Amino acid sequence: MTRKASRWCALALMIGAGFAYAYFYEAGGWNQNSRFDLVRAIVEQRRLAIDDFQANTGDKALVGGHFYSDKAPGLAIAAVPFVAAARAVAPDRPTAWTYVATVGAVGLPLALAVVALFFIGLRLGATPQAAGFSAGVWAIGTPVLAYGTLFWGHALSTACLVFAYACALRLGATTAAAGGAEPIPRPLLSVAVGLAAGWAVVTELPAAPAAVILAVFAFVSRPTGRVAAGIAGGAAAAAAVLLGYQRLAFGSAFHVGYSSVEGFSGMKEGFLGVTYPKWHVLVAILFSRFRGILPLAPVVALGPLGLVLIHRAGHRAPAIAAAAIAGYYVLFNSAYRYWNGGWSFGPRHMSPALPFLCLGLAPLWSRAPLLGRAVLGALALWGAAVALVCVATTAQPPELVQRPVEDLLWPAFRCGDLSLNHQSFFEAGSDWEQLRDRPPAEHDAWNVGEALGLHGLGSLAPLGVVWAGCAAAFARATSLKRGKRESR
């Protein structure tokens, strides 16, 4: 595939994914409010304590008589320049600040990570169609479509892991393998691995083992002292931010917010709530209609088989690294005390496993006959449909709803009752029984179609038009390349 054609494909993927993440404003909740309170404290008060804002969240730490966000600071720090700019342009529109923060610090990095996954697939020998399929499934055919619209840390942390993986993979590539492109200097690539993997940890602390896996993968790809030094230097820069934040906020560089969290006694079990994998939790996060990933995105079940094919094709280190990261997150989620993620769509704590599982879909698509591709496509469409139903209604179904898709999301979607979330970034939330009875006019969430004056399911029409255009552009870019080959 020519560089020009691959760039057109990548652009189509980025626009399709990025537009989707920016299309939905999911409003507030404890998790995002806690992070945004830290952003406000930094931007408005030049401090780290969130005392003046903490009433809107239960996710907070109490240290030295002051309240702090209990979350790792990476997402909040990344959002600071976006919020500062938004406040300067629209000082009296705080909702716009939260929207810009989410799109800039969550949606944009995630859309770029979708592009990175596409190029990873190409580098591992997939056809453009197959690489696009795997990246597209991850982008809109899994719960990541919901996570990309929320001011949570999972999407940014996952994006950073994908960036680190892409850089580690390229460390071992030659200029010829890169399609004749000018190679990025290896010292810069090694620093990028350490910095990206490190920032994944600064954003979500459980990413630390995945970051170590990526560092080892990068060094194995190019085992030199300069590469090791570059990885260590990038990681040290990220670590300095995290340790510096904790020193300024809590008085000790090694005191994490979760160790002083208010109201979550389970965090005192094991290491910050992590003990050992439990079989019933593993079954629940894989198969249950409450938080199971496979009922929501069944195509990812085939990902491990694809990783085996990548390994057999000679890409052993990339396949092992991807499988190790995916396996770690599944085990971590099953070992975590608060495994269900509270108000969440799907098993959010294992969401960083999804791009590495979806990577395995590329060789499956490349090798599958027509019937096999039809099956893959049908499974992918199911995941995309379920994800759209979720993100259009609410990406935060309450944990008391045991079958969120059947009992809440689909009935609301079918009736055109969209954007259900009533919680604000700026006000204390209510329990679900009170929120459920408020009229639709009082919803705090919205989508772009609704902002343009459209109603019900019709408000999703602009998104459908953009998705159709991106799909057509992607197909055209790949078909033109095939046509040039046939004419030679």
Image (cartoon, rainbow, N blue to C red):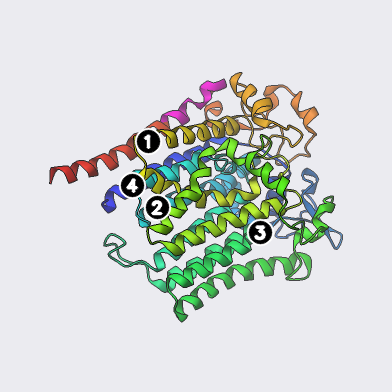
Which circle marks residue 206 in the picture? 3
Main secondary structure along the magenta-highlighted residues? helix
- Residue placed at 64% from the left, 23% from the top? 412
Which circle marks residue 471 in the picture? 1
CA gap between label 1 and label 4 equals 13 Å
Give residue 1's position: percent from left, percent from top. Answer: 27, 51
Q: Earlier in the sequence, mark 3 or mark 2?
A: 2
Give residue 175's position: percent from left, percent from top. Answer: 30, 66
The reply, left or right, for residue 2 in relation to residue 346 is: left
Q: Earlier in the sequence, mark 1 or mark 2?
A: 2
CA gap between label 3 and label 2 equals 26 Å
Give the crowd class for mark 3: few <14, some 14-19, many >=20 residues within 10 Å: some
Q: Earlier in the sequence, mark 2 or mark 4?
A: 2
Give residue 276's position: percent from left, percent from top. Answer: 73, 57
Whether tag 3 and tag 1 are in contact, CB under 8 A, the answer is no
Residue on which disc 2 sits: 121
